[in-house]
Amino acid sequence: MARCNFCDADFNTGPGDVLLVCPYCGTAQTTDGVKFKDHYMIRVHFDQGEAQTTLLDWVSKQLGAPEDLPATANFVQYEQIWYPFWISRVDAHTEYQGMGRDATFHDEWPQRRGAYKRINFFWKPESGQFTRRHEINIAGVKEIDEDIRNFPIPTRAKEFFSHAHAEEFDGKVLHSNMTEEQAKAQARQIAIDRQTKLVLQEISKIESRKDDINVGETFLIHVPVWELTYRYGNKKYKASVSAPTGYVIESQYPRSMSFRAGGIGVGLIMLLLGIVLFMIAFDVLGLRAMLSGLGLGPDSLVGGGAISGGLLSILGLILLYKAASRKEAKESV
């Protein structure tokens, strides 16, 4: 329980909440009652009915979804959750020195241009620099679905937070478990990690580097998400839809019996073809000699038999598992 330092109302808080939003006056404040000014939101543009329609339209287009799903699905639960995110704009400059891999090519095969009999790899010193501006989103709550944590936030559409707008849709505004200083520290480390990935695209070993990381504008933004549950047949399925954009963040959905049957059939064919290619590659039952008699030499089928057979067998098993599984499908965008 906490008391608002601006309207004197009491309201509930959870363990770990450190930046609070009063559900009565909408003021963002620290646990010490200090007002936080850089507090924004993304306005709702899809109400409950529009979010449900968008979801069903999207789900009906997914692979294996039943044709009657949009007509027979029944929504049994809905809630609009306002998730807090910290947004930091970070200017990063990295200078690096290290070793990159290079190669020399010898004895090109006359039958295949671009293929060589001998390749010698060696290390060579390299240096360079990267300058980037990163916009980094950090979820302000610990207990959050990974798809929601990573979905795109249209920050250009931000406006100052209005609790009255959230109340229009009975929205539940979550407090942040993270302070501004903690968010900036995480943003700085994420920017360093991103710079590291850029450097490692150019060189293989980093021997020295110099980073200039400037964490600039940092603000808290609340983003509304519709958490929906619908029933199809005897099962319930959950989904998350962005209230500002109608973007389907994630959705569970059933798969039709026709899709399952077709998947099992195709999976079995792929698995059998993979086994046959394996048998050819390892000359099981004398198949290699039989193919040679038909004019199909090692270069045409036998050489890639093991690799092709392995890939087909793996894909066949995956398709069989997906088709036979009783678990609902889950798509994320």
Image: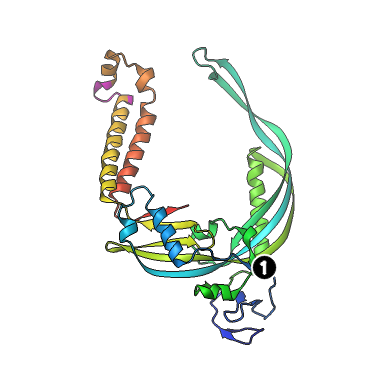
Q: Quadrant of residue 129?
A: top right
Q: Residue at x 35, y 22 (%)?
A: 302
Magenta residues, as a range? 281-287
Q: Is residue 121 above or below residue 23?
A: above
Q: Is residue 173 above or below residue 9?
A: above
Q: Residue at x 42, y 69 (%)?
A: 78
Closer to the camera in the image, 76 or 302: 76
Closer to the camera in the image, 244 or 326: 244
Q: Position of residue 314 (x, y in %)?
A: 35, 39
Q: Residue at x 63, y 87 (%)?
A: 8
Q: Position of residue 29 (x, y in %)?
A: 65, 77
**Residue 17 visible to the viewer:** no
Q: Secondary structure at mark 1?
A: helix
- The outermost residue toward the top is 110
Closer to the camera in the image, 282 or 82: 82
**Residue 269 visible to the viewer:** yes
Q: Residue at x 63, y 39 (%)?
A: 201
The amino acid type found where label 1 is placed reads: Glu
Q: Quadrant of residue 313?
A: top left
Q: Main secondary structure of the magenta part?
A: helix
The verdict on residue 284 being magenta is yes
- The outermost residue toward the left is 285
Q: Position of residue 230 (x, y in %)?
A: 36, 64
Residue, disc 1: 180
How was the colour assigned to the protein in this rendering? Answer: rainbow
- In the image: residue 302, left or right of residue 190: left
Q: Quadrant of residue 202?
A: top right
